[in-house]
Amino acid sequence: MPLDGLELNPGVIGPNIAAARRRRSLSQADLAKRVGVSRPTLIAFEAGQRSPGPEMLTTIAAELETRVRDLAMLPKYDSQAEIRFRSPIRDDKTAAGAVQALSDFARYYVLMQDVAGKSFQQPSVIAISIEEASDVEHAAEDLAAAERARLSLGDGPLLDLRAVLEQDIGMLVFGLRELQSAKIAGIFMYANDLPLIGFNVQQSDPRRQRWTLAHEYAHYLTNRYDPEITYVTENRRSRSRQEQFAEIFATNFLMPASGVSRRFAKIAGHAQHTTLAHIILLADQFHVSFQAMCNRLESLGRIPRNTYDHAMAKGLRPVEAERALGIDRRTESLPPYPARYLYLLSLLLRRGTLTEGDAAHYLQTDDLSARDILHAFEPTSSNQIDEPLRAL
């Protein structure tokens, strides 16, 4: 996006400079000295009272290791979201990087929507307080059933949870490379009026990633304004009330009691004895792990307790068992970018409003990878899909 002829709005630039400076852990005095201005002048820049001008803006961007156009054009950081996450990421650099990446995606998306003139109507979903709930388990079960009914999902397997969250709820789901070396399954944050989920792309099992999405969705429905980082190795016994609620919600949302019971009875049929094969087939239907389905059937009283532990102790290998049953387990990770996000990028590239360098920056990857991502996404009739029907 060229800056030529663009009016530099100090009300936009100032907050962006301040946020970028804080990210670099620089004081106002430090940055002022580096760029050759007085501290009161820098304070005026950050307050939006004075415009730094093109040359000074270029100098400031270089010192902050950011792009001039990002300081000049991007929506300002959601300061409240930044403040909410300040405590949980203070001593975790990996989590801090992931939160920053997710926040940047939100700002890029808002900018692209504005430039393209295509805004997605965010459905109104009221957050529910669970602080007064006397029984977390029943509250989570009730909310999962209510959401299934509200979204007309029935009680069967939820084949594409991500599509439901992105298309029906208006969430943006990103795979975060920043989490690859971390013991973090997912992050939820509400920034720039957007609900955002970041999942760990290193978790190659899409079933685990789907569980993370359902877990983070529970946080959106309840404590959406609180910072939320879900650690893989978290001790279940030490989980907070909110985390317990989210896990129970995910179980009931992905595996409704009525749907699981009915399909289990159908799979077992008239067999004299229930077998592990029945459980594995049912787990495949609902796109969950063998362990998750064992736990669910145990909670419903359909199989003996500790079935999973006994099966593993006897040497069961779920992957080999699935192969023997003809189940082709999909192991590819979920795509790292929301379809709406890629659509806006592709649209702006076709219009010539966005450069390939911009696209790589907004995808947080290199130019070659960005070209491959967008080439694979771009529709074959791209010159027609945005035309009004009356023009066809």
Image: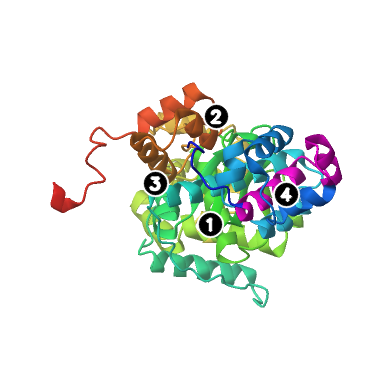
Which kind of residue does numbered mark 2 sit on?
Thr
Using the image, determine if residue 157 lies above or below residue 203.
below
Q: Earlier in the sequence, mark 4 or mark 1?
A: 4
Q: Residues within 10 Å of mark 1 (few under 14, many from 20)?
A: some
Circle 4 residue: 18
Circle 2 residue: 365
Q: Nearer the viewer, mark 3 or mark 4?
A: 4
Which kind of residue does numbered mark 1 sit on?
Leu
Instruction: State the residue in front, 316 or 375.
Output: 375
Q: Earlier in the sequence, mark 3 or mark 1?
A: 1
Q: Is residue 30 magenta?
A: yes
- Can you tell which mark lies on residue 194? 1
Instruction: State the residue in front, 274 or 222.
Output: 222
Label 4 and label 1: CA atoms lie apart by 22 Å
Label 4 and label 2: CA atoms lie apart by 25 Å
Which kind of residue does numbered mark 4 sit on?
Ala
Circle 3 residue: 285
Tag 4 secondary structure:
helix
Q: CB atoms at circles 4 and 1 under 8 Å apart? A: no
Q: Earlier in the sequence, mark 2 or mark 1?
A: 1
Q: Earlier in the sequence, mark 3 or mark 4?
A: 4
User: Which residues, given as a range, are shown in magenta?
Assistant: 10-38
Label 3 and label 4: CA atoms lie apart by 50 Å
Q: Position of residue 354 (x, y in %)?
A: 43, 36
Q: CB atoms at circles 4 and 2 under 8 Å apart? A: no
Q: Position of residue 34 (x, y in %)?
A: 81, 35
Label 3 and label 1: CA atoms lie apart by 32 Å
Q: Nearer the viewer, mark 4 or mark 2?
A: 4
